[in-house]
Image (cartoon, helix red, strand yellow):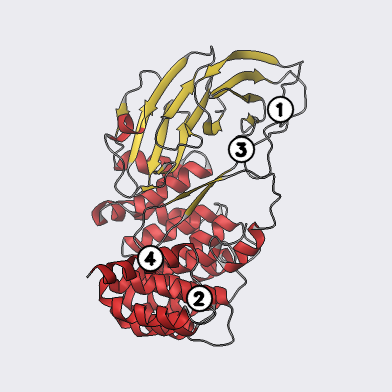
């Protein structure tokens, strides 16, 4: 995938076939509008880790039908078929006729994702497709087809997690989930690292303590351990310090998966421990690594290196737009004012790509430093269309109404020349101009 909202991404996206249907929703973030794309729901066949159990999911009205199956003895593992961009509503996901059907039934909403555990009967449906946060967030169907659990976001957390973002379609609240097959429970992690554990047997909801987080960090699937370590890194300093011995063990064990070692290093940094992980992070951000690994390593460079991360992030922004393009902006934002002089220099660096310069403007829009206003206004008036538009929005996000006179002057010149405003710049600038006229 390309980097979202960069010119490179736009050029790639317009090549999608006309038949690709998707809806756009816009995040309500002041000065910045972020699209939310939905592709048609796809029939799916989700398989357990051992590939011996699977569930066939097919769209039916507003919900789904399902067949939970067990592979016939001696049969080869069955192929998983997921939905998403490259799927199709007509995916051929029928079960193998030789396999044993454990349960069938219907559920009244489309799932965002599905998980089939290895040792427990049943499967998990997570969230509502097209409308995340507005339906049942956790649904567990047991091996008999009974709906054992069906919980909303409000039932899980009591409120919308504070760091959740909203679009016209959804509440984007979750960071991940897993099934603890030993404890027979479902664990959900929200943005901001709020965690809830739900007992499959009786639906009891609890908030895990430090001991549970340490247990999950030490055992289970890689996904579960990685999420648990991320939660640990955001706990109060005294608790993070208690996690340091486990994190040290994970970091030093070359047999551990790289995502776990990276997160262990961050835990140690947050505990105030000296960490020798520069080489690991350099390897992790290499182009041969999976996107998720690269993004995590880049996002946490400021945690590991402090100001020494700035030249590395600058070099990464020179790459063609990629999944780490937006991640670099977030990392620069974490550095705050310390990154502003470099970002101003990047914004004005002639001969560089619009992705590079526009990315610098995006980062400045996140930081909102008054020290960057002059450079942003200069770019608004003189830079290429895309860079000028991003710089305009960054300036508005930083200076707001105080920039009205400057922006009216710039608009007056530009409306008589070549420039036009795209979706976000036009709306933001027009609002300021109208407000000025009303005054």
Task: State the quadrant of the C terminus.
Answer: bottom left
Tell me the crowding category of disc 3: few under 14, some 14 to 19, or many 20 or more residues within 10 angstroms, Cα based: some
Q: Nearer the viewer, mark 1 or mark 4?
A: 4
Q: Which mark is residue 40?
A: 3
For this view, does 407 lie left or right of residue 49? left
Residue at 35% x, 78% y is 408
Dot 3 or dot 4: first in sequence order is 3
Residue found farthest to the left: 439
Dot 2 or dot 3: first in sequence order is 3
Dot 1 or dot 4: first in sequence order is 1
Q: Nearer the viewer, mark 4 or mark 2?
A: 4
- Give above or below for 218 relative to 187: below
Task: State the quadrant of the N terminus.
Answer: bottom right
| Helix, strand or loop under label 1 | loop
Nearest the viewer among 54 and 83 is 83
Q: Nearer the viewer, mark 1 or mark 2?
A: 2
- Give above or below for 82 relative to 32: above
Residue at 29% x, 80% y is 405
| Helix, strand or loop under label 2 | helix
Residue indicated by mark 2: 387
Residue indicated by mark 4: 428
| Helix, strand or loop under label 3 | loop
- Give above or below for 252 relative to 131: below
Q: Which mark is residue 93?
A: 1
Dot 4 or dot 2: first in sequence order is 2
């Amino acid at each position: 995938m390309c980097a979202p909202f960069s010119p490179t991404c736009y050029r790639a996206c317009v090549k999608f076939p006309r038949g690709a249907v998707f809806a756009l929703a816009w995040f309500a973030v002041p000065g910045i509008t972020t699209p939310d794309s939905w592709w048609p729901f796809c029939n799916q066949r989700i398989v357990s880790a051992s590939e011996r159990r699977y569930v066939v999911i097919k769209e039916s009205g507003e919900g789904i039908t399902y067949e939970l199956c067990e592979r016939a003895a001696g049969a080869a593992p069955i192929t998983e078929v997921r939905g998403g961009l490259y799927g199709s509503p007509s995916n051929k996901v029928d079960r193998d006729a030789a396999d044993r059907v454990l349960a069938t039934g219907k559920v009244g909403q489309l799932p965002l994702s599905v998980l089939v555990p290895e040792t427990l009967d049943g499967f998990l449906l997570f969230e509502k497709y097209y409308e995340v946060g507005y339906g049942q967030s956790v649904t567990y169907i047991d091996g008999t087809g009974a709906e054992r659990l069906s919980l909303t976001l409000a039932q899980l957390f009591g409120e919308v997690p504070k760091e959740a973002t909203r679009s016209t379609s959804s509440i984007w609240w979750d960071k991940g989930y897993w099934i603890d097959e030993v404890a027979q429970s479902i664990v959900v992690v929200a943005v901001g690292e709020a965690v809830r554990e739900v007992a499959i047997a009786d639906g009891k909801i609890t908030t895990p303590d430090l001991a549970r987080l340490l247990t999950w960090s030490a055992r289970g699937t890689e996904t579960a351990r990685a999420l648990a370590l991320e939660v640990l890194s955001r706990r109060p300093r005294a608790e993070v310090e208690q996690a340091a011995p486990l994190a040290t063990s994970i970091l030093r064990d070359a047999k551990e998966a790289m995502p776990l070692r990276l997160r262990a290093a961050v835990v140690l940094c947050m505990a105030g421990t000296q960490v020798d992980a520069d080489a690991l992070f350099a390897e992790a951000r290499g182009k041969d690594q999976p996107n998720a690994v690269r993004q995590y390593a880049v996002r946490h460079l400021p945690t590991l290196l402090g100001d020494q991360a700035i030249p590395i992030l600058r070099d990464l922004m020179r790459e063609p737009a990629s999944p780490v393009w937006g991640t670099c902006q977030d990392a620069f934002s974490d550095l705050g004012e310390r990154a502003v002089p470099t970002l101003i220099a990047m914004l004005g660096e002639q001969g560089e790509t619009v992705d590079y310069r526009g990315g610098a403007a995006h980062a400045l829009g996140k930081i909102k430093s008054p020290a960057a206003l002059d450079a942003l206004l200069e770019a608004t008036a003189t830079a290429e269309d895309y860079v000028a538009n991003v710089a305009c929005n960054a300036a508005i996000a930083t200076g707001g109404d105080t920039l009205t006179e400057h922006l009216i002057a710039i608009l007056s010149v530009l409306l008589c020349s070549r420039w036009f405003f795209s979706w976000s710049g036009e709306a933001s600038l027009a609002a300021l101009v109208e407000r000025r006229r009303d005054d």
